[in-house]
Amino acid sequence: MMDVATYQLLDGRRCSEALKTRIAHEAAEVKAARGRAPHLAAVLVGDDGASRTYVEAKVKACEAVGFRSSLIRLSASTTEEELLALVDDLNRDAELDGFIVQLPLPKHIDPDRITLAIDPRKDVDGFHPVNIGRMVLGQKEGFLPATPRGVCELLTFYGIPTAGKHCVVVGRSNIVGTPMSILMSRNAEPGNCTVTIAHSRTRDLAAITRQADILIVAAGRPEMIGADMVKEGAVVVDVGIHRIEDRSRKSGFRLLGDVRFAEVAAKAAWITPVPGGVGPMTITSLLQNTLKAARG
Ligand code: NAD
């Protein structure tokens, strides 16, 4: 007998397109009201291929919704002081609503020092401690980190119930796992989950992930989650993204997530693809944050 797929796709591209239509409409309103479209700048230090792709995708997304965008490329030898001076200029630029400094930075630059230097009102990545603090306290005026916000938008778009569910987040980074766990446990929609955070020191990970009604994986380990680690009927969100060399492709690589899609999809009720799941949602969240910054 042939396997009949019962899962449904949490399609980040489809959700993004729907949200972007609304963002474009609101961007036009902002432009009409103040005579200037929302404006996002992205700073790229060095020439990492994946980072360049992400930044270019962000700039392209701005154009598609009628934002102004600026891409600032700096050489890998840029010093921390030079980057801090640029951040200072961008903080003061009255024509700019928000900006991001693409991570990772070259080893000689301390990312925490850079993040701390960004004006929280322009920190549309939502990484500044002030914005993280506002998220933890549930204050609405801050910016939520783009990737966890994108996951929340995706769950909302597909009407996934979260209240009272057990959500397991694999990974505890400052930009994905930790904020994701906070958003899922907040008294909000989506939210109200009982949350477990698993990480590199967790014992018997499979025993924990198998308890998840909602499993969000951001471990940065290609295809680490197999069907044996997932409960029947779970909602599975794969944040991981890895470029794996593939000479048979024109690009020279293919993309894999942290989840073995085919085998997990056979068990899951809902699952994100890679690519086309969380990736587009991260970019759309950045646009939403920039629009919020432009509205002041
Ligand atoms: P990170 O390396 O900073 O953090 C990984 C986390 O996973 C750590 O907290 C670690 O404790 C945990 N971990 C590692 N190995 C583990 C294991 N075997 N078992 C359990 N936990 C383990 O990574 P990050 O910045 O949080 O990103 C995670 C993944 O998400 C990466 O693949 C990254 O490329 C991807 N990512 C995607 C997007 C997107 O828009 N799709 C955005 C950000 C990050």
Image (cartoon, helix red, strand yellow):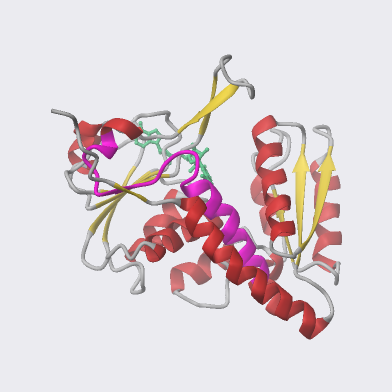
Residue 149: tell me if it is visible. Answer: yes
Classify 161 as above or below 256: below
Residue 145: tell me if it is visible. Answer: no
| The residue positioned farthest toward the bottom in the image shown | 33
**Residue 87 % position (x, y):** 80, 56
Name the residue rendered at 48%, 48% in the picture. Answer: 278
| The residue positioned farthest toward the left in the image shown | 1
Classify 61 as above or below 172: below
Magenta stretch?
Answer: 264-291
Q: Quadrant of residue 231?
A: top left
Name the residue rendered at 52%, 54% in the picture. Answer: 281
Classify 84 as above or below 184: above
Total marks in image:
0
**Residue 111 part of the magenta-drawn span:** no
**Residue 156 % position (x, y):** 39, 66
Q: Quadrant of residue 118?
A: bottom right
Task: Depth check: give the residue in front, 46 or 269.
Answer: 269
**Residue 163 % position (x, y):** 25, 68
- Left or right of 60: which side holds 129? left
**Residue 268 % position (x, y):** 24, 44
- Left or right of 14: which side holds 7? left
